[in-house]
Amino acid sequence: MKNSKTQRKLLAVFAHPDDETFICGGTLAKYAAEGVDITLVSATRGEMGRRMGNPPYLNRESMGAARESELREACAHLGVRSLHFLDIRDKTVEFIDEAVLTERVAEFIRELEPDVVLTFHEKLGGHPDHCAIGKATTAAFRRTAVRGSLYFISFGDMMAQPERYGYSREDVVRVDVSRHLQAKLAAFRAHRCQTEIDEWVWRSNREALSGFGKHEYFTRGAGKSGNGGAHDLF
Amino acid sequence: MIPIIRSDAEQQLRKFVGADAYIHSEATSYIFARNFKVRITEAFVAGEGPYRVALRFDGHGWLRMEALTHYEAEEQGRLLLAGYDDRGRMNVALHLGKEPFPE
């Protein structure tokens, strides 16, 4: 057992089950494989999602429990040790009192003292729930963190060209996930009701794996930069 | 959830007539309203599939939805209707219950 001073810790704060897998599953799997202790906080259970399985086997009332169960399985594939929900209804995160939401995230940061915090960029997050949890987590990080670094996750390879979003190359960390795509694929498949509609996920492993990029990109939010430079979050 | 059988869906809906009901109603990509309580006075199912459902309530109200394809009458007395597209994506939902749905 490593003691708590040498154990590296990562806290990811996202909005819906599947954010962790679809956006940065390779990175979570990579750091878990390296022994990093990973905690995931999901604001919602994704209970207002539109994809109900293909053919559909869920309804609005059964969806939350189904997606929680899928997320637990995905976490097992990725190596995420600890999973927490904020119990906010999907699609309503932006309407939760900002101070209350920030304080709830801050409690996790104080408790864990993570080296790395991952969340959504409050403007580039896309979905309103993403932006809202990203904003609260950013505020919580600034309020609490005495150490560690904050990074924003990004979709696909949009940050391969950071200038388009007002960032420079120095702001971007590009993580090589090429050795962890099998775990990412397993997690994609664990999110069955969300991925059944995407035929490529269910083709042979080799075909499905070819659908993934070799890198996942993160932009620096706040805190001291890790020693990893352009390729490592720690 | 199974494909709607109109005569049975009408019968299930009629169980809510004359009493207070909690409603969850949504057009998935646009709006949802959860747990508004109304007193239902009439209930209708129309169409040959996909189906239209309309409720009259409180002596002055209408709720009408279309594109409903599937339903389920749950053991605890809730009636769930939904409309899915041909790839399992939900377009609309209409749920009725005697008790509030989980918030």
Image (cartoon, rainbow, N blue to C red):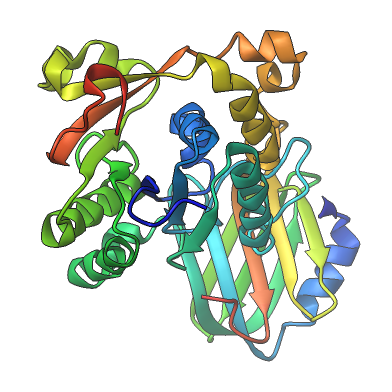
Q: Which of B49 and A184 is in front in this view?
A: A184
Q: Can residue A121 be seen in this view?
A: no
Residue A175 x, y percent position in the rendering: 37, 20
Q: Which of A33 and B6 is in front in this view?
A: A33
Residue A79 x, y percent position in the rendering: 58, 42
Residue A39 x, y percent position in the rendering: 45, 53
The answer to whether A138 is drawn above or below residue B99 in the figure is: above
Left/right placement of residue A211 relative to residue A164 reads right
**Residue A126 image-quadrant placement:** top left
What's the residue at 29%, 28% (across, down)? A218
Left/right placement of residue A162 relative to residue A35 reads left
Q: Is residue A18 visible?
A: yes
**Residue A43 image-quadrant placement:** bottom left
Quadrant of the image for the N terminus of chain B? bottom right
The answer to whether A174 is drawn above or below residue A54 in the figure is: above
Left/right placement of residue A9 relative to residue B5 reads left
What's the residue at 53%, 41% (across, down)? A18
The answer to whether A64 is drawn above or below residue B66 in the figure is: below
What's the residue at 19%, 51% (across, down)? A138
Q: Which of A57 and A122 is in front in this view?
A: A122
What's the residue at 81%, 63% (across, down)? B72
